Image (cartoon, rainbow, N blue to C red):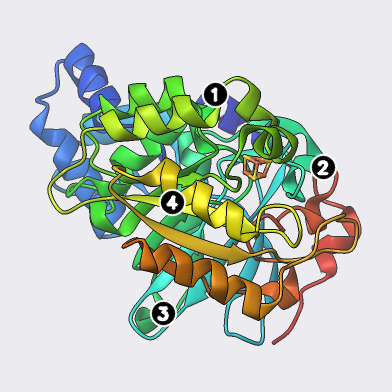
């Protein structure tokens, strides 16, 4: 398909069931046909409306006139010693994002991006240095999953998804919600809601809207400090939504039975890793149904921060466990390829693809 056709028609990937039902109603087509089209596309991986033989010829041509199928292009793969792969993906307009596939014994997790860059400006995060270039569409968000899954072997296919790559998911609210609905729909990508996690820096208003979406998706809250002055410095969003406001939102958040929030806490040596920090953190989280992931900082050259010693991390964790919290030290993945938490951005420093990197396919 040439580029002008792409502009004239809409990407089918990212089109929600609700939007397609409305379109079919406008066309006078029975809405049960939506399920048939979704089954062809997401279950049988059909990318040509003409092959959808249980649809009438006229509906097939109407669909072909209205939609195209477009996925991000994989421009680079960087392989980590731990088995993870960092993908550089190029969108139709040349914008690029990174996604990281991380295998473990029981699961294959994809960390995907929701924005090109980010405007939240967290001081420990490499993505922040890009600023926000643009939001991704729902099609570009699920497209990362589909494009990567398409090239993986059957046994390596993605089982879990975390929205923790480039961008603040709730800052790109509508497309992220559409992408989530397609991802967890039994008619579409069929990912279990228990296997999807959306990470947020704590945009409280958007968190309140999200809880009304009837999407039982786990939230991970990036907290990273035990007092407002430190969190203001690390995460400027705290000036708008300070810790007490965030905690109040979490305590009132209607969780499904047996679900709990994930609290992400990046440990930075000498900044937020003291015994007093652990004590204040435990006080804040009293009454919040949660588990705590402690993430020793993944250092990068231009950063002013360093990770704490292993001993300090263990002491911090032990205190929280003594206070009856589930506290885990999250094993860093893909650190050797700058694919770990807060490290995505290096290959795409301008937010668009460096022409030279198009030929730089990194081998295992
Ligand atoms: S940590 Fe997340 S929210 Fe903060 S700047 Fe980085 S990508 Fe944005």
Q: CA distance from mark 2 to mark 1?
A: 22 Å
Q: Quadrant of ligand 1?
A: top right
Q: CA distance from mark 1 to mark 3?
A: 40 Å
Q: Residues within 10 Å of mark 4 (few under 14, many from 20)?
A: some
The residue pinned by badge 3 equals 156
Image x and y of residue 200, in percent: 50, 40
Vertical arrangement, residue 316 with respect to residue 63, above or below: below
Image x and y of residue 2, in percent: 64, 39
Report the mark closest to the observer, 1 or 4: 4
Instruction: Determine the residue positioned at 27% across, 29% down.
Output: 252
Q: Is residue 332 visible?
A: no
Q: CA distance from mark 4 to mark 3?
A: 38 Å
320 horizontally vs 195: left or right: right
Secondary element at tag 2: helix
In terms of sequence position, does the residue under pointer 2 or pointer 1 come before the other? 2
In terms of sequence position, does the residue under pointer 1 or pointer 4 come before the other? 1
Report the mark closest to the observer, 3 or 2: 2
């Amino acid at each position: 398909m040439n580029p002008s056709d792409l502009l004239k028609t809409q990407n089918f990937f990212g089109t929600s069931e609700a939007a397609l039902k409305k379109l079919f109603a406008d066309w006078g087509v029975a809405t049960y046909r939506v399920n048939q089209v979704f089954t062809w596309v997401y279950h049988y991986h059909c990318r040509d409306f003409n092959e959808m033989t249980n649809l009438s010829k006229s509906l097939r041509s109407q669909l072909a006139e209205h939609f195209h199928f477009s996925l991000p292009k994989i421009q680079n793969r960087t392989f980590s010693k731990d088995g993870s792969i960092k993908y550089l993906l190029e969108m139709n307009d040349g914008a690029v994002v990174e996604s990281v596939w991380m295998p473990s014994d029981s699961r294959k997790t994809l960390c995907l991006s929701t924005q090109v860059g980010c405007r939240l400006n967290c001081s420990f995060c490499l993505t922040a240095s890009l600023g926000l270039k643009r939001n991704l569409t729902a099609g570009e968000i699920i497209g990362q999953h589909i494009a990567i899954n398409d090239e993986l072997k059957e046994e390596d296919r993605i089982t879990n998804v975390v929205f923790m790559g480039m961008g603040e998911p709730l800052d790109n609210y509508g497309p992220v919600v559409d992408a989530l609905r397609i991802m967890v729909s039994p008619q579409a990508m069929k990912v279990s809601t228990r296997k999807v996690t959306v990470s947020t820096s704590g945009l409280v208003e958007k968190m309140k809207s999200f809880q009304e979406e009837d999407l039982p998706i786990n939230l991970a809250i990036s907290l990273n400090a035990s007092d407002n002055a430190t969190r203001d410095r690390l995460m400027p969003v705290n000036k708008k939504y300070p810790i007490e406001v965030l905690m109040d939102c979490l305590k009132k958040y209607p969780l499904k039975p047996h679900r709990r929030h994930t609290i992400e806490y990046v440990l930075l040596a000498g900044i937020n890793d003291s015994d007093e920090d652990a004590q204040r953190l435990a006080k804040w989280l009293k009454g919040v149904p949660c588990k705590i992931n402690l993430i020793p900082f993944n250092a990068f050259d231009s950063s002013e921060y360093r990770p704490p010693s292993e001993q300090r991390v263990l002491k911090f964790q032990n205190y929280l466990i003594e206070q009856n919290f589930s506290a885990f030290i999250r094993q860093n993945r893909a650190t050797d390829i700058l694919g770990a938490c807060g490290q995505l951005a290096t290959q795409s420093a301008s937010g668009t693809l460096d022409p030279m990197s198009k030929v730089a396919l990194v081998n295992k």
